[in-house]
Amino acid sequence: MLIDMSTSTSGTQARTTAPTRRHDDAPDTADLFARLATLEDGPEREAVRDELVTAWLPMAHRIAGRFRDRGESIEDLRQVAALGLVKAIDRFAPERGAFESYAVPTITGEVKRHFRDRMWALRVPRRIQELRNKVRVARRELTQTPGSPEPSTADIAAHTGLTEDEVNSGLEALDSFSTLSLDAELSGDEDGYSLADTLGAADSAYDVVIDREAAKEGLRRLPERDRAILYLRYFEDMTQSRIADRFGISQMHVSRLISRSCARVRAEALGQAGSSGRAAAA
């Protein structure tokens, strides 16, 4: 179904307005809804549904207009509101009462969902989004009088009942619909740097510290000769042949001792006590 974005008055809209209605874009379509409820899927039902959409589209456009100037074009907002209107018509049951009372929150929710799911370049917690909306409304209310100064954080906090920390979070979120590229230059001089240059990276030295601490107990439990051989091999960078000459054993025996000691320490560092016992007995 193509949705006519025109806000011109249709024949159905001509049947509008009772004096007690809040808005003049709320037509009297009770008969159409009652008829729609009795129809099975088919061309006739689609025709009645289209007539209802056309009749209530001005109201959907009015709701979309409440969200203008938030970074989204009014045409796109009207399309989203029209989608919400279609959902409201499909889900409405005449026994629920006035369609307007059901449609307004449905359409408004669809537009808000559009902002939440499509407009944020980075997923922002719902709580921060709500703070952003409160701060935005408060700033607008505090600057309605011509010549009013830009409200301070304390002014906004007093107006909304929020804490200053919450206001600051909302202010930061005001410009959070779009993200800044990591390649964006942050300094204007010749030695400028990008945002990526300010980000930290994992320090591999921490892994070394963890490994050393994990191996300490296993090394302490090694026989003195095995500890000495490991020290000469890995800290003094001595060859296996020179180690063998120092201890009066073969180079092959040194190789076996190093392999056995490393396996034992590794197993104990990983918490495999059984494996370390078997490695020591080998």
Image (cartoon, grey):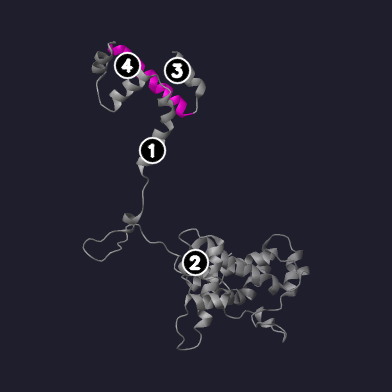
Label 2 residue SS: helix
Q: Nearer the viewer, residue 30 or 256?
A: 256
Q: Nearer the viewer, residue 29 or 45?
A: 29
Q: Nearer the viewer, residue 206 or 128?
A: 206
Find residue 109 and report its horizontal and vertical position in percent: 61, 67
Range shown magenta: 250-270
Find residue 280 and report its horizontal and vertical position in percent: 44, 16
Q: Nearer the viewer, residue 126 or 108?
A: 126
The residue that mark 4 highlights is: 255
The residue that mark 3 highlights is: 279
Name the amino acid type tagged 2: Ser
Label 3 residue SS: helix
Q: Are marks 4 and 2 in contact (CB under 8 Å)?
A: no
The residue that mark 1 highlights is: 209
- Check if residue 171 falls in the magenta segment: no
The C terminus: image quadrant: top left
Q: CA distance from mark 2 to mark 1?
A: 37 Å
